[in-house]
Amino acid sequence: MASFNSTLDLNKVKVSTQTIAALSLDDSKLNSAMEKLEKYGFIIISNSPGKTVTNDEIRENVLDLKPLFGTAAYHIRADDDGVCPIGNFIAVDIATKEKQTKKMKGVCKATTSDEHEPHTDSTFQKRSDEFLSLTCYQPSLDGGESYVVSGAAIYEHIKKVLKPSQIRPLFRSDAVTFTRGEESATKAIFTKDEKTGNIVLVWRKDIIVNKMDEAVHPDAVAGVLAMVSFIEDERNHAVYKLQRNETLLCNNGAVLHARKSFPDDQIRRLDRLNFFTIGSGAKLDGRLQLGFKEQHTATATGNGMLGKKTGDYKKAFPFPAATPRNSIVLSTDIDGGSCRRLSIISQAA
Ligand SMILES: [Fe+2]
């Protein structure tokens, strides 16, 4: 998976289709869309660009994501289809489940016009949602842009600025406790899937930053602080303002998603529908993996692997399918940067 920052050319993650149903039936186009999702961890789907559509037609696009991505994930405000409305039309206090006026903004940021800082969804639940979708019915006139932060870039950053002894606690199963109202979950911030080698990220700063002592394991504090400064840096934000009938679709463990604030007297309306894909039997089950691949950076002379056996290289550098035999990717830094390869002659070859 390629890491990215604010310079990412968003044309690389855009997918254009008449409808989600049409995309589902077009294997070539669907494959191309999934390659983008696998590479960057998110895509922007433009449905019927330039055409006038009804709200019912947009809702149909939202629901037609289910046969592709799987079972709808739980949300406390979701309807019977698992769809959760996003907008500043009302605020809901999750603790009391009471609807509040706009002036009494509740703890559920999705129902406010405030900035919703970079996060993964379902941090409060034991099992994290796997893929998420946000489909726009009405963008606000001003502000309200969505933005995405690369999990691979975050991980690359902490490997540069932290010691291994500061990174390891971020993998602790009790690294952080996320609590919102009655919902609470204690989790690792990074989890490595031993089957795929992928790393799955969980993050929501606003819940923990003002109570680091109680929410964050002491050993994980340095790592959390390093992550906060990187994630808050606008140079790491890929920003896009969703238009009507456009969908932001994210691998929930690979990227963080966020929303900029907008004027409270303007309307911004989206539907959220998240999925459990793995094992669901959906069309993309078996194709998609959770989280991101760790990117291995090393110098040509300093990786200490030359002269070792083929098996050792495989352990140290998971080979992408497209990597030619006897070559390893040494650097796949920020998208748009150079991608250098070094040929290695294996003793076992
Ligand atoms: Fe979210």
Image: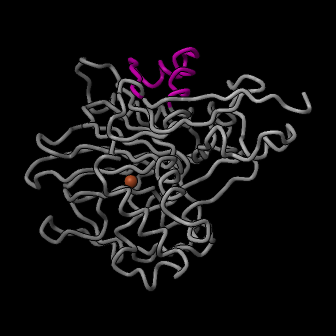
Q: Left or right: 35 with respect to 75?
A: right
Horizontal and vertical percent position of residue 331: 57, 36
Of 46 and 234, nearer the camera is 234
Which color scheme does this rendered protein use? one colour
Q: Which residues are magenta?
A: 13-36
Q: Residue furthest front?
A: 301
> Who's the residue at 37% across and 45% down the image?
148
Tell me if residue 81 can be seen: no
Q: Left or right: 4 with respect to 346?
A: left
Looking at the picture, does residue 159 appear above or below residue 276?
A: below
> Who's the residue at 48% across and 40% down the image?
3
Does the magenta run of residues contain 150?
no
> Who's the residue at 46% across and 45% down the image?
132
Q: Left or right: 347 with respect to 104?
A: right
Horizontal and vertical percent position of residue 123: 48, 63
Of 198 and 42, nearer the camera is 198
Tell me if residue 224 can be seen: yes
Of 88 and 165, nearer the camera is 165
User: Where on the picture, by quarter, is residue 133?
Assistant: top left
Horizontal and vertical percent position of residue 329: 64, 33
Type of secondary structure dominating the magenta stretch:
helix
User: Where on the picture, by quarter, is residue 249?
Assistant: top left
